[in-house]
Amino acid sequence: MKLSIWSVGKANESYIKEGVDQFTKRIGHYYPIDWQLIIPSKLTEPIQIKKAEAASILKALAPTDVLILLDEKGKMLSSPGLAKLIQQKANQSAQRMVFLIGGAYGVDDEIKSRANFTWSISELVFPHMLVRLLLAEQVYRACSILANEKYHHE
């Protein structure tokens, strides 16, 4: 299975990029992984922005992709819970699992209905770049849990 992390927004600031790169490299020992930045829409109305971003996202998704949407209204998971989700999808022979961080206004309902799982990493709201770092760390933590390595302590 391949992991992809997609995020609507600008490139990472250097202080975020260093951490994201470090965790991405670590994840690469377990799964092939890539990142895709989706350029935010230049439209001005939030509804139009979400629709335009949804069109780009849906065009890039394969029908067989497992889409994990990060959304503050999603279901909370523990780190072992995320590991279990990744393992379940790997066991189901998923070809690619895509983690999606939406744009500044969230995502269109079409994306929400396409998502295989909607995950909230916190009830707090974070800047998108920081969510990228948190997500990279949590995916790495999940991989280390699945490999029974010492990174995660219970």
Image (spheres, rainbow, N blue to C red):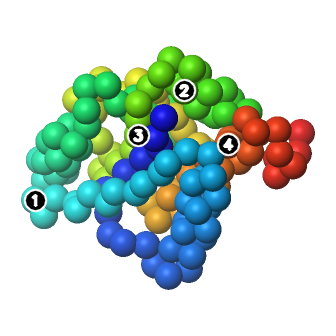
Residue type (three-letter) at the residue carrying disc 2: Ala
Residue 108 appears in view: no
Residue type (three-letter) at the residue carrying disc 3: Val
Rounded to the nearest angstrom, the CA distance separating label 3 from label 1 is 25 Å
Q: In the image, is 117 to the left or to the right of 26?
A: left
Which SS class for mark 1? loop
x and y percentages locating residue 85 in the rendered image: 59, 27
Q: Which residue is mark 1?
A: 43
Quarter of the picture containing the C terminus is top right
Rounded to the nearest angstrom, the CA distance separating label 3 from label 2 is 13 Å
Question: Which residue: 52% across, 24% down?
Answer: 89
Q: Which residue is mark 4?
A: 143
Nearer-the-camera pick, 118 or 86: 86
Furthest toward the top, the residue is 92
Q: How many neighbours does mark 1 have within 10 angstroms: few (below 14), some (14-19), or many (20 or more)?
A: few
Q: Which residue is mark 3?
A: 98
Question: Which residue: 62% across, 46% down?
Answer: 30
Which SS class for mark 2? helix
Q: Are marks 1 and 4 in contact (CB under 8 Å)?
A: no
